Image (cartoon, grey):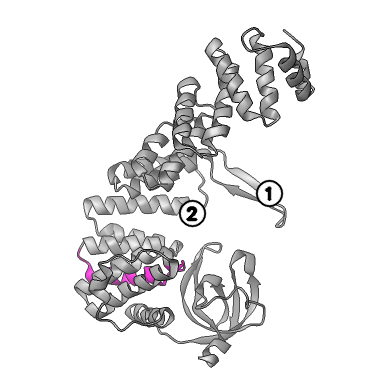
Amino acid sequence: MSDFKEMRRNKEFDKIIGIYNSEMNVESADKWDTWNFIYALKVSEKNFEAEEISLKLFELHPEFEYNKNILSWILFENHVKKFKNSDKALEATVFILKNITQCKESSYTNAVWEMTEHFKINKNFDKAVEWLKKIDVELLSSDSRKYYVESDEKVYYYYSEKEHWYSTMSKLLFDLENYEECIAICSESLKNISEFHHDNDIWINFRLLYSKAFLYEDAELIKELEDLSERKNHFILYFYIFRLKSKLGLTADAIDSGCKACLSISPDKMKIKVYYELGIFLYDHLDKNIGSKHILLCKLIREKEGWIVPSNYSVYTEDLTTKNYKELKTELIEFWNIRLKRELNFFEGEIVKIFVDKGFGFIKCEEGNVYFSTKQFTSGASNKLQQGSKIRFNIVDAYDKKKKQNSVRAINIQFVEEEINE
C-alpha cells in the first residue's frame, strides 16, 4: 500500500490523483489506494470520474464498507440531489438503500428525503408516503437545528430531523385523506416531540382535530379547531373548518368560516380553491348571484396568472356583467365583512415603521399603532412604501403570536392619493 493515507491527511489530493493515474489501476491496486484516489477525486469535485472508479471497486470488493459509503454519497450528489433524470435518481437511490444502512454518516436519509420531495412536488402523495416510510423515525435526531443570521446578529432555531419527518408525514396523509393513519402519526408526534418550530404544533393539532371530526362527525371538535385559528390566522385553517361545517350541514356557520378564509392574508392565487368552493356553496345554499361572483373572481385570477380557465366556470358567470378585478374584489370584501358583521369603517393614518424585506410594518392612527402586511395593499406598493406615507384601511381582529394575545391588523390598504385619483 502506498503513502496515500498520509497524503490524504495532508490534503495533497492532486498528488494522489497524479500518482494513481500514472502508476495504478483499479484492477491491480490495493483497495485502500483506490479508495484514497476516489476520495481525492470527490474532494476535487471530479465526481463523475470518482463514480466510475468507485463502481468498478464495488464490483471487485462488494463488501468494502468504506467504498460503499463514499459511493453512496457520490451517487447521491451526481444523480439524486440534482435530480436531472428521474430514472437515474431512482436507480441511484435504490442502490443506496440496498447497500448502506440509515445512520448519521450515510446518505441514506438524504436520498429518501429527495425522493419524497420529488413525488410530493409532483402531487404523487402515495409515492411520497411510500418513500418517507423507508426512514426509521426513531433513528432521526431530536435536536433542533440552528443557523446564524449575520445581518440580525441572531441565532435562529428550526425543526429537528424527527419533527420534520412527523410534520411531512402527517401533511401527506392529511392531503391523501388517510385520516385514520394521520390521527396515529399526529398523536405519536405530539408525544415524541418536546419542542415544535414553525407553528408545527398548531398544524399537527389541526390535522389531528380535523381528521377526528371528519371521521367521527363530531361537531364538538370544531370549537377546538376555531381556537387554533385564533392562534394562527391562516386561510387554510378557516377553509377546512368551512369544509367540515359544510359536511355537517352547518350552512350559516360554514359560510362565515369561508368568509374568514377569504379575508385572511395570502395572495389570491393561493386562495383560488377557497373562492371557488365558497362560491359553489353560496350558489347552492344562499344566493346564486353572489356565488357566481366568487366564480368570476376565480376566472379573473386565472386570466391574470395565465392559467387555464375551466369550461364549467361559464355556467356560473355567463349572465354576469364583467367587472374589473379591483372592483369585483372590493364588492366581495364588503360582502365577506358584512356577513361577519364587521363594520367597514375606513381609518386613515401614516406608516411609522416599515420592514420592506420582511413584508410588514406599523401604521399610526387614532386607534394607536396597527400592524400591517404589505400583501394587504390593494395595488402594487413596493415602489411607494416609505415612512410617512398617508394611507387608508380597515381594521380587523388578529392574534399576536409573539405576545400570545388578541390584537388587530390592517386590511384593504390603499394610499390616500389612490382614492383621490379615483
Q: Residue at x 38, y 81 (%)?
A: 328
User: Up-down: is 156 above or below 289?
Assistant: above
Amino acid type at image mark 1: Tyr
Q: Main secondary structure of the magenta part?
A: helix
Q: Nearer the viewer, residue 285 or 39?
A: 39
Q: Secondary structure at mark 1?
A: strand
415 relative to 295, above or below: below
**Label 2: element kind:** loop
- How far is mark 2 from mark 1, CA to CA? 20 Å
Residue 308: tell me if it is visible. Answer: yes
Q: Return the x and y of residue 190 as percentages of the image width and height.
A: 42, 44
Label 2 packing within 10 angstroms: few (<14), some (14-19), many (20+): few
- In the rendered structure, are the residues bearing label 2 and label 1 in contact, judged by CB atoms less than 8 Å apart? no
Q: Which residue is mark 2?
A: 199
Residue at image position (47%, 30%) is: 93
Q: Is residue 46 above or below residue 326?
A: above
What residue is disc 1 on?
A: 148
**Which residue is pictured at 58% across the width and 28% down the height?**
74
Q: Is residue 104 visible?
A: no
- Residue 51: give its label: none
Where residue 398 appears, x then y in whole percent?
A: 47, 70
Above or below, 104 against 417 in this view is above
Kind of residue at badge 2:
Asp
Q: Which residues are magenta?
A: 249-268
Residue 170: image location, x then y, percent: 38, 45
Q: Is residue 263 magenta?
A: yes
